[in-house]
Amino acid sequence: MQPAPTETAAAHGRVRKLAAFVHRLAGVGPLIGLILLCGLGTALNRDFATAGNLLNVLTRTSFIGIISVGMTFVIISGGIDLSVGSMAALIAGVMIWTMNTLAAGMGAHTFAPLSIVLIGIALALVLGALFGLAHGLLITRGRIEPFIVTLGTLGIFRSVLTWLADGGALTLPNNLVDFYGPVYYASLFGVPVPVWVFAIVALGGALILNRTAFGRHVQAIGSNEQVARYAAIRVDRVKCATYVLLGVCVGVATVLYVPRLGSATPTTGLLWELEAIAAVVVGGTALKGGEGRVAGTVVGAVLLSVIANILNLTSIISVYLNAAVQGVAIIAVAFLQRGRR
């Protein structure tokens, strides 16, 4: 006996409501995990819940968090970038080398430090955009897989930095370190500058993804690139733009990172790509593309930093296994996402 149409419609309605509930639950899953982790950290060590420690966690998160915002757009569009750590290292090296060269020629000028720092910041942003554009063109016009392109540039960027630093370190002079230092160490209303920059970048990324045609095109391309082409979306241009956006985010993160230590070495930015991808996927963005949230990425980045902070404050497992924890997180989330698009 066939069910009545009203019964079938009601059953379909219940299924849709259940699916919507599961989808919403998946969206808040990272936030629930972060809250539970914070409770665990507080229980294990009272110093975890102090304002100083929480601000330290957010400050350390800012570099990876800013890069992760750009990575969110790339992954939603169906791409990937394995070179962001090496890119940041090379940008930092070129930035410091240029600033040192300018300082040698402008040392006697009263406004030299300000001019040199501003030139270094502008150079970092331009280099990030150019590296991102190169990735986008190789992927779209060259028809090379993103994995291959960025795996190749990962080695290129870091080897060029190693050559530029002659295997050692590129270091800013003390006068520039003192002048540039507040970009990382200063606070505004009690909140460190990097945290403010991270918040601004995240808010801007969320608005672009959710409130602009570009953001909708990025999601459409990740969902089904062929359909996006039929819909007259300029797929190659949008893909290039996502890599340029990521490159600029890497440049911003590098601008904040350089004054922290005032130097760049061949190990600068090591495994940043792992942390950025982990933050994006833990935050709920589908690895196959088409779906994701900047807010989830922010929560994912903070969550991973909280894990690292708990490992530093306790002796549950060695802090040297932090990268292993992130790798396990990526694999676990990818396993849960299998078949999802």
Image (cartoon, grey):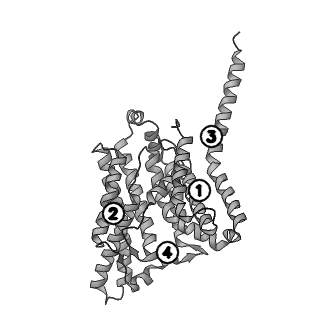
Please tell me which of labels 4 and 2 falls first in the chain: 2
**Dot 2: element:** helix
Residue in the picture at 29% in, 65% down: 160
Q: CA distance from mark 1 to mark 2?
A: 29 Å
Q: CA distance from mark 1 to mark 4?
A: 22 Å
Locate residue 76 relative to residue 283 in the image: left or right: left
Residue in the picture at 49% in, 58% down: 275
Q: Amino acid at mark 3?
A: His
Image quadrant of residue 305?
bottom right
Please tell me which of labels 1 and 4 falls first in the chain: 4
Q: Which residue is mark 4?
A: 184
Above or below for 5 versus 163: above
Indicate the position of residue 199 as horizontal and vertical percent values.
55, 63
Q: Amino acid at mark 4?
A: Tyr
Front position in the image: 7 or 43: 43
Please tell me which of labels 2 and 3 falls first in the chain: 3
Residue in the picture at 72% in, 19% down: 7
Above or below for 46 versus 294: below
Q: Which residue is mark 2?
A: 158
Q: Which residue is mark 1?
A: 299
Q: Amino acid at mark 1?
A: Val
Q: Nearer the viewer, mark 2 or mark 3?
A: 2
Please tell me which of labels 1 and 3 falls first in the chain: 3
Check contact, mark 2 vs mark 3: CB within 8 A: no
